[in-house]
């Protein structure tokens, strides 16, 4: 069972990783980083974004902390 605090902590961690990846990708373009490496970073960023959206959706559930 996941509680709200656990999900919020995971969300913050993922958002920080997403931001770092975004900055690294921007730097990669500026420094002419290889397409393959940039592609891997973009894929990881997309996966993080999907998980972030999933967690944000779960956190909107008002019954999240109610025992089932």
Image (cartoon, rainbow, N blue to C red):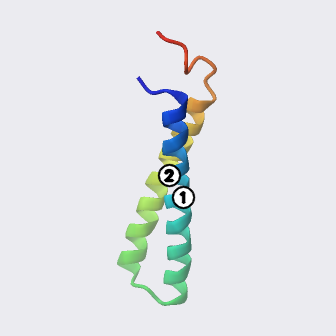
Percent from the top left, x then y, of residue 44? 41, 60
Local SS, label 1 = helix
**C-alpha separation, residue under disc 2 versus residue under disc 1:** 5 Å
Residue at 56% from the left image edge and 73% from the top image edge? 23
For the residue pair 29 and 18, the one nearer the viewer reads as 18
The residue that disc 1 covers is 16
Percent from the top left, x then y, of residue 35? 40, 80
Percent from the top left, x then y, of residue 42? 46, 66
For the residue pair 68 and 5, the one nearer the viewer reads as 5
Residue extending farthest bottom: 31
Residues tagged 2 and 1 counted as in contact (Cβ below 8 A): yes
Of the numbered discs in the image, which one, if any, rests on residue 13? 2
For the residue pair 41 and 61, the one nearer the viewer reads as 61
Name the quarter where the N terminus is drawn: top left
Q: Is residue 56 above or below residue 47?
A: above
Residue at 47% from the left image edge and 89% from the top image edge? 32
Percent from the top left, x then y, of residue 33? 43, 85
Q: Name the image quarter holding residue 57.
A: top right
For the residue pair 34 and 2, the one nearer the viewer reads as 2
Residue at 54% from the left image edge and 29% from the top image edge? 4
Is residue 50 left or right of 35 when viewed as pictured? right
Residue extending farthest top: 68
């Amino acid at each position: 069972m996941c509680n709200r605090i656990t999900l919020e902590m995971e969300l913050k961690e993922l958002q920080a990783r997403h931001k770092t990846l975004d900055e690294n990708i921007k730097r990669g373009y500026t420094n002419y980083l290889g397409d393959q490496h940039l592609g891997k970073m973009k894929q990881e960023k997309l996966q993080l974004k999907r998980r972030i959206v999933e967690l944000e959706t779960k956190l909107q559930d008002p019954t999240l902390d109610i025992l089932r």
